Image (cartoon, rainbow, N blue to C red):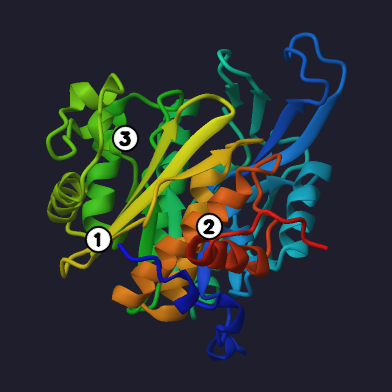
Amino acid sequence: MENRGLTFNILKDDLGRFSGKGPVFVTFGETMVRDTPADMQRLERTGSIYVSLAGSEFTVAVLLGRFGIPSAYITRVPDNPYGWMLRDTARSNGVDTRFIVWGNKAEPMGRLLYEIGRTPRKSVGWYQRMFSAASRLGPGMVKWEEALKDCEIFHTSGITFGLAFHSKYEKNFLLEAFEEALSFKPSNCKVGLDFNFRATLWPAEKCKEVMTPLVKNHVDILITTIEDMATVYGFPCGRYSPEEIDKGEMGEISDDDLKSLATRLGEFFDLSIVAITIRYPDSFEENRWESAVMDNQGNFFRSPQVKSITLLDRLGGGDTWNGGFYYGLLTSGFGPEGLEKGLLVGDAATRIKQTLMFDLPIITKNEVQEILKADVEGGGKRVSR
């Protein structure tokens, strides 16, 4: 694919059509408090912790809010300082918080204990999400009609629907809230979902049982990875079998391999758009990244090149890509131009984000535009002053 990064000048995008509207991007899920050793010690030995926020859907909303897209984030949090921290962080990044649901101050907020590794030691995360305030966000709690009245993309992730199984609830509160929300979305609103399988929340078979009808019946835009589709559904990626994918034995991935998987997903789930993000983890410090998108009309776009990233913190990288991809769709439409623009903006945004600590994409449109320009013209290594 020819790199048309300079064709898409996101600094000149006209966002005027959003003026006076409610949020055009709405997402809901859980945000966790993340604890990371500030002294690079093991968690069991550290005496100093960095406290930050981590959450798939929240990360997407922050990127879009920072880029000027009217965006709202919906969750349920305890009415205590951690809940206030989430609200204040969202507001400071341009995200609408009017529809956040407040629980009792004594309810727990989900936590992620995260220990950063170095080659060859892996980074490791421990979830503490059972019985969290967000996992009990159910029907009747959110003013969906107001939240979604101008919505063009309504987004969530598979993580959200795994929380009920994780907590061993008898019913899936968040799934019921999602189904309630769908009854209020405008007819032109697309539903997007990042599959985001987490084996620590639920087994693959349970995930498949819940997610298959959900995606088939309600989702227009699916974002996923080759690995998740091999693990949960046993889908190959072109010539590569699920077993080879699971063992990390794939060689070079061709366009035909990706088109084969995207076509299969599109037909199986009856989707309008399939997006596939691809990470090559060469070491803890060095990863490579690319992505591909395809719609049900056969329009296919892939990253012009596989790009290296010198990591500082990879968490939030995929979600940042999602935000950049949605930015392309919301500003240039759901056709070929929006697909290509979204892929390029998503790639640039995630490459920047993964050089930053913590999950949230505290980046600017100008930085992304500079990456798009550098990818075409070269350069970009001098200090910006």
| Nearer to me, 190 or 250 | 250
Which residue is labeled 1 in the image? 294
Left or right: 343, with 257 as reference point: right
Left or right: 59, with 261 as reference point: right
The tag earlier along the polypeptide, 2 or 3, is: 3
Q: In which quadrant is the N terminus drawn? A: bottom left
| Nearer to me, 61 or 380 | 380
- Disc 2 is placed on an element classified as helix
Badge 2 amino acid: Ala
- Total marks shown come to 3
The tag earlier along the polypeptide, 1 or 3, is: 3
**Residue 334 visible somewhere in the drawing:** no
Which residue is labeled 2 in the image? 348
**Residue that appears at 44% across and 63% down:** 344
Badge 1 amino acid: Met
Q: In which quadrant is the C terminus drawn? A: bottom right
**Residue that appears at 57% across and 44% down:** 316
The tag earlier along the polypeptide, 1 or 2, is: 1
**Residue 238 visible somewhere in the drawing:** yes
- Disc 3 is placed on an element classified as helix
Tell me residue 266's x, y (percent).
18, 55
Tell me if residue 197 comes above or below residue 343 in the rendering: above
Label 1 Cα crowd, 10 Å radius (few <14 / some 14-19 / many 20+): many
Which residue is labeled 3 in the image? 228
| Nearer to me, 158 or 383 | 383
